[in-house]
Image: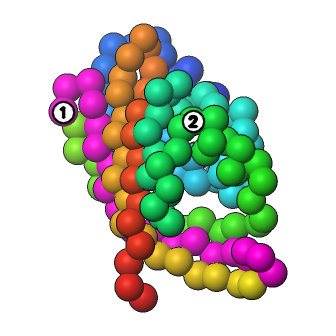
Amino acid sequence: MLMCVGTWSAHAQAPVDTDSRVLALERLWGQAAQFRDIKALESIFDKSLVYVHIDGRLMTKAEVLEDTRMASSVDIVVESSMARSHGNTVIVAGILRLKGVEGGKPYLRRGRFVDTWLYEEGHWMCVSSMTTPMQR
């Protein structure tokens, strides 16, 4: 499904309904992460991805993919999000909830995220992502 959305925008110049297309990629990102679909994640992350994890770690694309590969099961729910277009760039901001088990102990985390998407060479790629923890 992720590949279809990526190809769909690949045949057009920066799409008119940019925000909705990028928000669809955001939803697919959450699903791919939840089901550890590394191939799908590889296709939406730029090779120079700068990623700030909710725990503060600064990570590369390779580190994000490895972290996803090694993670235990996690439920990812985006509570809200909005997108703003700026030419060939879209900034997405929102709130997410992560629920899972780490070190044998259950956790529930909420965070605000900001993702930056760039339309280049016929498709959208996430070039940066940052999530900061929120109080419950």
Confirm whether the magenta stretch covers residue 57. no
Q: Main secondary structure of the magenta part?
A: strand
Q: Position of residue 17 (x, y in %)?
A: 31, 34
Q: Which residues are magenta?
A: 86-104
Tell me residue 93's x, y (percent).
Answer: 32, 56
Residue 56, placed above or below residue 101: above
**Viewer-proximal residue, 61 or 44?**
61
Q: Closer to the observer: label 2 or label 1?
A: 2
Badge 1: how crowded within 10 Å, few (<14), some, or many (20+)?
Answer: few
- Residue that mark 1 sits on: 86
Please give left or right for residue 118 compared with residue 27 in the image: left
Q: Residue at x 81, y 81 (%)?
A: 104
Distance CA(mark 2)–CA(mark 1): 24 Å
* Residue shown at the point (37%, 35%) measured from the top left: 117
Indicate yes or no whether the magenta region holds residue 94: yes
Which of the 4 quarters of the picture holds residue 108? bottom right
Q: Which residue is mark 2?
A: 61
Mark 2 residue crowding within 10 angstroms, few (<14) / some (14–19) / many (20+): some
Q: In the depicted view, which residue is nearer to us: 64 or 39? A: 64
Image position of 24 (left or right of 61) = left
